[in-house]
Amino acid sequence: MITVGIDIGSITAKAAVMQDGKILAVRILRTGYHARNTGDLLFEGIVSGLGMNPSHIQRIVATGYGRKSITFADQAVTEITCHAAGARYMNPEIRSVIDIGGQDSKVILLDDTGRVKDFVMNDKCAAGTGRFLEVMARALEVDISEFGSLAFAADHSASISSLCTVFAESEVISLIAKGESRENIIAGIHDSVAARVSAMAGRIGWIPPIMMTGGVAHNCGVVRSLEKKIGHSLKVTPNAQLTGAIGAAMIAMFTRG
Amino acid sequence: MADPDQERRKIKSVRKMKEIMTHYYIAAKTAGETGKKIAWITSGGPVEPLIALDVIPVYPENYGAMIGASHMGVDLCEKAEAMGYSRDLCSYARADIACSTVDGGPIGGLPRPDMLICCNNICGTVLKWYEVQARFYQVPLFILDTPVCHTGFSTEVHNYVKRQVEEYILFLGQVCGKRLDLEKMAEVGRLSIEGQRLWQLVLDTTVHKPAPMSAFDAFFHLALIVTLRGTQTAIGYYQELLEEMHTRIREGIGAVPQEKYRLLWDNLPVWYRTRWLSEKFAAHGACLVADTYTSAWCGSMKYIDPAYFINTMAEGYSRIYLNIGVDQMAEQVIAMIDKYDVQGMVMHSNRSCKPYSFGQYDIRRIIQERRGLPTLVLEADMVDERSFSEAQIETRIDAFMEMI
Ligand code: SF4
C-alpha cells in the first residue's frame, strides 16, 4: 500500500511517500503565503519524482497547522498524533517526544504501545520555538544553519532572561552593543529555548527514551542545551524534520478509509 | 432552512430566560424613576439582604460576560490599558472600569450605583476594582472580608465573618434609610436556598446519558442564580427549566447529536467563543456535561440553614469553591468526575482569573493520579480575545480527542 503524509507547518511544508512501512521519497518546501498551493506543489512534485501519478497513491493524511487546507487529503490528523507515530516508526522504544517546530513547541508522552497518553504545548507566543531562533538569527546576522556549530565555540552562555521574543531580541541587541561574542549569545539563546521546553517536559513528567523531532532538532546547540537542562540524552534522527509527515503516512496506512 | 434535528435540540426555555433578563435590566436601568436603589455587587457577594431591602443588585461580572459575548472586550480592555491599568489585571475589571467612562457597552452601560458591595471570597482583585469604582462614582463601599478556608472553618473565622455580616446589615440600613425587615429577610433566604437547590437539580440532569444539556448551556442559564438569587422569579424559571430537562431525558434528546465522550470543564467560560467551542467539541461527539464554574453558586448550600439564613450565611459565603484549598478543590472535582461519569477534563487556563487558574496543574496531577483521567489545558481569557489563538486551540482540541 502506498501512502502519503503531508505536514504543512508554519514555516516549512514536508511530504513523505511510504510503501508498506518503507520511505520511498521525502520533500521539503517553504510553506509561504499560500498553504494550499504549497500542498499541491509538494504532492505533485513528490509523486511525479517517483515516476508515479496520483492514482498510485491509496491514501493521504495531512497534518500540521495547514492540515485543513489540504482538501485532497483523505483525513486530517493533528501533528501531536503524527509526531508520536513518526517517532515510534523511527524508534519503537520511544516514550517521550519533544517537538520544536516553527510556531510552537510540544512535549508528547506515549504509553508503551505508542499511543499518545498526554501532551503539553507552549502557550501562544513564539518563545521556545523555531520562530524565536529565526528572529534571533536575524538580529545576529547569522544564518540559522550555523547556529549549532557556533554555539559549540562559546566560552560561556550569555544569560537571556526575557521570556518574550520581542524583549529577548532587545536583550540580544544590548548584548551585542556590550561586545558579548556572537557565540556566547547564541549559546545563551539556546539555553533560553531549552529552559522553556524543559519546563514543559518537567510538567508532563517525561519518560525515557526521549526523541527530539521537528526542524530545530537539527540544531545541535539546542539539543545539547536541552539535554543539559533535562539531564537526559535525546535521540535525534536525520529525518527529524520529517517526523510529522512520516507519521502521517504511517497513520494513512493503518487507518484505511 | 432550519435543520429539524437542530430545532428539536434547542432548549426552549432560552426565550423565557432572555425575557426575564431583559425585564431585570430594564428595572435596573429605570431605577431612577421608580425610586429604587442600585447596588453593584460581586458575583459571590451576599445579595439576600439587598433583595429583602428592595435594592436592585447589579453584577459587573455578569455584565463583563455580556461584554465578552458581544465582542466588546478588546476595545474596552485597550481603553483601560490606555488609562494605565495593566494588561495582567482581570479583564472583567478592565472592561468594567473602562466602560464606566464611556457612553456605551452592551445595553448602553450599567445603571449608576448607589452603593458597592464587595466580597473577596472569589478573589483579591475585586477589592481594588471596587475601590476604584467607589472613587469614580463617589458612593459608599462595603467590603466583606472572607479569609481563605484552606482546610476547614475555624470558630475565629466564623466570628470574624459573622461580625461583618452584622456590620453589613447596619451599613445597608444607613444607605437605604430603613431597617431590614427580619421576616422578609428570612423569606428571601428561603427563596435563595430553594433557587440554589433547583439550579443544582438542573445541573444534575446531565448525569443522564445522553446529557440533555451541556456546560455551554449551563453558562447561559446560570445568569439567574447569580442575578436573581433570592427571588421567586429564579425559582419559577428553574422549575420550568428542570421540567424541560426531564422531558428531554424522556424523549432522549441530547445536547450533542451523538454523545460519545463526556467531559468536564474547569474555570470560567470563554465568553466570546462559547458557540465555537461547543461546536468544536460536538463535532468530535464530545459533550461537556458538567463544569466547576456554574455549580459554584450552590456548592456551599450545605453550610446554610434556611431557617437561620442570616446567622449561617457567614459560613456559606466563606466556603465557596474559589475560597478553599487546592486539595479540597481537587476533592470536589473528583466527586464531579465520578458523578457525571466523564472521560476527560478540559481546563481553561484563564489569563484573567488567577485564583481559578492557579492550582490547576496540581488539580490536574491529583486527578491523573487518582482517576487516571486525561486533561486538556486551553490557554485563553474569558473576555480579552487577544489571548485566544484559534489555530492553537483547535490543534489542542483535535489532538486531545484523537488521544481519547
Ligand atoms: S479575577 Fe477571577 S474571580 Fe476575580 S473578578 Fe476576575 S474573573 Fe472574577
Image (cartoon, coloured by chain):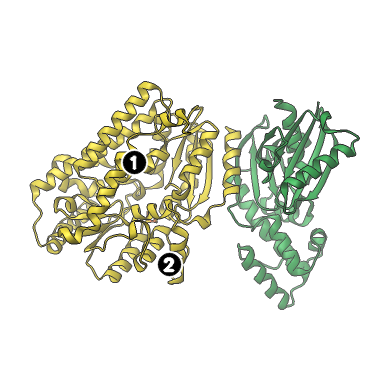
Chain colours: A green, B yellow
Residue at 29% across / 47% down in the picture?
B21
Q: Chain of mark 1?
A: B
Label 1 lies in ligand 1 vicinity (Cβ under 8 Å) = no
Residue A87 position (above or below residue B121): above
Residue B127 placement: quadrant:
bottom left
Question: Residue B70 location, x and y as percent?
Answer: 42, 53
- Sequence order check, earlier mark of 2 and 1: 2
Q: Amino acid at mark 2?
A: Ala
What residue sits right under mark 2 in the picture? B80
Instruction: Say whether mark 1 and mark 2 are on the same chain.
Output: yes
Left or right position of A211 against B139: right
Q: Nearer the viewer, residue B180 or B394?
A: B394
> Residue B172 or B375: which is nearer the viewer?
B172
At x 68% / y 75%, what residue is drawn? A174
Q: In which quarter of the view is residue B85 placed? A: bottom left
- Percent x, y of residue B351: 48, 55
Q: Residues within 10 Å of mark 1 (few under 14, many from 20)?
A: many
Question: Does residue B236 appear to the left or right of B285 in the view shown?
Answer: left
User: Seen from this angle, which residue lies furthest front?
Assistant: B1
Residue at which label 1 appears:
B221
Q: State which quarter of the image contains the C terminus of chain A.
A: top right
Q: Residues within 10 Å of mark 2 (few under 14, many from 20)?
A: many
Whether residue B139 sits left or right of residue A177 in the image: it is: left
Callout 1: helix, strand or loop?
A: helix
Name the spot of residue A133 as percent of width and height, x first.
Answer: 72, 60
Q: Which mark is residue B22?
A: none
Chain letter of the residue beneath label 2 in the structure image: B
Quadrant in the picture for the N terminus of chain A: top right
